[in-house]
Image (cartoon, rainbow, N blue to C red):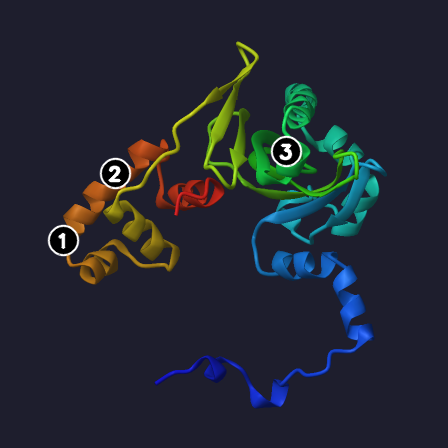
Amino acid sequence: MTKIEDFFSLSNTVRNVSQVDKAQTADYLEPIKAFARSTYKSIYIIDYETKGFEYVSDNPLFLSGHTAKEVKEMGYSFYLKYVIEKDLDLLLKINTIGFEFYEKVPVEKRKDYTIAYDFHLKNQEGKTMLINQKLTPLFLTEEGKLWKAICFISLSTAQHSGNIKVYNKNDGLTLMYNLKRNIWESIEKIKLAKREKEIIELSTRGFTINEIAETIFISPDTVKFHRRKLFEKLDVSTISEAIAYVTNNKLL
């Protein structure tokens, strides 16, 4: 019978952690850097005191031909250079409504919220791609001001920029900002059926339609039926887009 101890190596038994070792925990960036090495997403740390980037992960897909170090040094001028003009106005709008939203939330609950939105980013050749950015508070000042935030950037599954949403990790609340009416509106979170979850989970593992059918004991045509329903529900056209949507919106 497998025991908990089986997951740990005797040659790596840790005892009597020194003060020097404990001091390493003060560097909160280390686990973030480790996570960045294991994901395709780009990670930024925004410092609102210095009005710049404290950290930029090394993901060339979202750096518009620059190195992570160069983007970190560029700070917000990176957005000015590589975000299309109409989406720059959108980002300024998001900045305004985002802070207005946080100021209405009790200080002790502000870290529970994540804001997400889509905008177009150019590469050095001028070609654009639609990306999704999620921003979550990391540290607040004693007065409750947002000091540092972490951003996760991935390819968007949407068809256009905007799609401004706020999520609450505790109560499952999702709000979408209506840009025409300038108000936040509650939206019902999409719920996946059992088969849809199974298909997504197996697809993320690289299973083909036939392999999925064999694993969950249904026919390939039934898998295709559930995939079509899933695509309609998520408003996507491929399984890759469906996986990205489900991941970005935490539907599993």
Quadrant location, the N terminus: bottom left
Query: Which residue is denoted by mark 3 in the rendering?
Result: 121
Residue at image point 42% right, 25% down: 187
Query: Which residue is denoted by mark 2 in the rendering?
Result: 228
- Mark 3 is surrounded, within 10 Å at the Cα level, by few (under 14), some (14 to 19) or many (20 or more) other residues, namely many
Precedes in sequence: disc 2 or disc 1: 1
Is label 3 in contact with label 1 (beta carbons under 8 Å)?
no
Where is residue 233 shown, x and y percent of the image?
Answer: 31, 33
- Specify the quadrant of the image occupied by residue 85: top right
Amino acid carrying mark 2 in the image: Arg
> Can see residue 117?
yes
Q: Nearer the viewer, mark 3 or mark 2?
A: 2
- Specify the quadrant of the image occupied by residue 207: bottom left
Amino acid carrying mark 3 in the image: Leu
- Specify the quadrant of the image occupied by residue 191: top left
The one nearer the camera, 75 or 250, is 250
Give the distance between the C-alpha atoms of the residues marked 2 and 1, in whole angstroms.
14 Å
Residue at image point 15% right, 59% down: 217
Give the distance between the C-alpha atoms of the residues marked 3 and 1, in whole angstroms.
41 Å
Query: Which residue is denoted by mark 1 in the rendering?
Result: 219
Residue 203 shown left or right of residue 96 in the figure: left
Is label 2 in contact with label 1 (beta carbons under 8 Å)?
no
> Can see residue 67?
no
Q: Please determine whether, in this image, residue 138 is positioned above or below residue 89.
A: below
- Find numbered disc 1 in the image and state the secondary structure of the residue it sits on: loop
Amino acid carrying mark 1 in the image: Ser
Residue at image point 25% right, 47% down: 194
